[in-house]
Amino acid sequence: MNQHDSERHPIMNDTRQPQFMRKIRSFVLREGRMTKGQQRAMDTYFPQMGVVFSSKSIDFTELFGNTNPVILEIGFGMGKSLAEQAANHRDNNYLGIEVHTPGVGACLLLAEEYELINLRVINHDAVEVLEQMIAPESLDGIQVYFPDPWHKKRHHKRRIIQTHFVDHCRTKLKPEGFLHMATDWENYAHYMLNVMKQVTGWRNCSESDDFIPRPSDRPLTKFEHRGQKLGHGVWDLMFKKQS
């Protein structure tokens, strides 16, 4: 994976749906070895907590057994921040998507440790899931934390945050639903802000119309802790869907 560490989580773009029209992936899939614990989690817990990819929209009330708000996280890496968030906010439901199987296994291990019943995971291409499994206006929020920045200019076309992707996210959110993005690359932060300024139907939650302080409900990642010690910055962007 082309990333700082296992928390960096790139996503693949759909090559079949006409609204994406790109044959460019925003990640290089390099599957690491599964540990015995991760494999055990996949064997034991994925049947209960995993959602198998299909072309059918998910019924969240049926999936979680309640009508609590549903937050989708796209690319959760090894799942530590997602599991912590689910543990800290048990009145929300969380659906995490990650294409790298070892990360899914690691997340399931944490779900076991934290005794989570409000977390489900999908081991598949996030854009295909968004397109085929998420019904319009069914989500209360979408989180994209520390996606691969593809920092070289010639690779910017591989970044997951593009105008067409953001427009598609908007169709899946309820009115006033949020899109929360975070990055530790300043260039990517300004790039994402510029993308959001090019699309309609969003309201920036920043009082200065740029970035927001890190919300208390977004747990610090491992490499974010390390970056703070080295004096690195982190930029959070929060937008809400306008009615």
Image (spheres, rainbow, N blue to C red):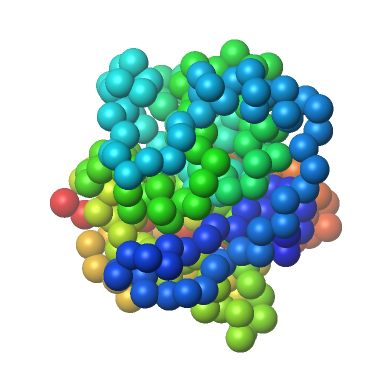
170, 131: nearer the viewer: 131
Q: Position of residue 206 (x, y in %)?
A: 41, 57
**Residue 10 to residue 200: above or below:** above
Q: Residue placed farthest to the bottom in the image?
A: 154
Q: What residue is rendered at 43% in x and 75% in y? A: 22
Q: What residue is rendered at 51% in x and 29% in y? A: 50
Q: How many marks?
A: 0
165, 52: nearer the viewer: 52
Residue 216 visible at all: no
Q: What residue is rendered at 41% in x and 53% in y? A: 128
Quarter of the image with the N terminus is bottom right
Left or right, 16 with reference to 118: left
Q: Residue placed farthest to the left in the image?
A: 243
Left or right, 166 with reference to 147: left
**Residue 158 to residue 140: above or below:** below
Q: Position of residue 45 (x, y in %)?
A: 60, 20
**Residue 184 to residue 141: above or below:** below
Q: What residue is rendered at 34% in x and 16% in y? A: 65
Left or right, 194 with reference to 150: left
Q: Position of residue 145 (x, y in %)?
A: 56, 51
Q: Position of residue 240 (x, y in %)?
A: 31, 52
**Residue 180 to residue 220: above or below:** below
19, 180: nearer the viewer: 19
Residue 36 visible at all: yes
20, 72: nearer the viewer: 20
Image quadrant in which you'd find residue 203: bottom left
Image quadrant in which you'd find residue 21: bottom left
